[in-house]
Image (tube, helix red, strand yellow):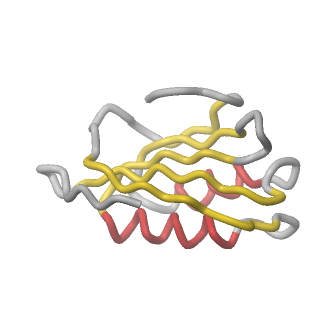
Amino acid sequence: MSDSGNAVDGRERLEALVRGRVQGVGYRFFVMRVADGLPISGWVSNEQDGSVRCVAEGVRADLERLLAALREGPAGAVVSNVSEEWLPATGRMTGFSVRSAGHRGD
């Protein structure tokens, strides 16, 4: 984990990788519903290894809410580990989406 400080506009970037039983249980759409209720932008996708990757930008408090939801997951999911990295926001994302497996970049 690193904490590289806030971006100029007060927004940060959270990059999280979620491991456990998180595919085939509606996990990405659960994340989408949580994100829709927050003023954040980003995306969530399944990874080839069975994990789920989430990248989001917003103010720290809202990203912390998202992170708490990532750790919980929907009914049927079993989250064993969430690795997180905090970076300055890029400002290049708008909205929040579900992306195809193995998507890279903004």
- Residue 72, position in %: x, y? 68, 72
Q: Residue at x 53, y 56 (%)?
A: 35
Residue 99, picture quadrant: top right
Q: In the picture, which quadrant includes the C terminus? A: top left
- Residue 80, position in %: x, y? 74, 67
Q: How many labels sit on residues?
A: 0
Q: In the picture, which quadrant includes the N terminus? A: bottom left
Horizontal arrangement in the rendering, residue 11 relative to residue 103 (left or right): left
On screen, residue 4 above or below 47: below
- Residue 91, position in %: x, y? 27, 38
Work out whether residue 53 or residue 58 is closer to the camera in this orientation and state it: 53
Residue 30, picture quadrant: bottom right
Q: Residue at x 88, y 66 (%)?
A: 76
On screen, residue 43 above or below 78: above
Q: Residue at x 60, y 69 (%)?
A: 69
Q: Residue at x 51, y 64 (%)?
A: 66
- Residue 11, position in %: x, y? 25, 54
Horizontal arrangement in the rendering, residue 100 relative to residue 97 (left or right): right
Work out whether residue 74 or residue 53 is closer to the camera in this orientation and state it: 53
Q: Which residue sits furthest left?
A: 8
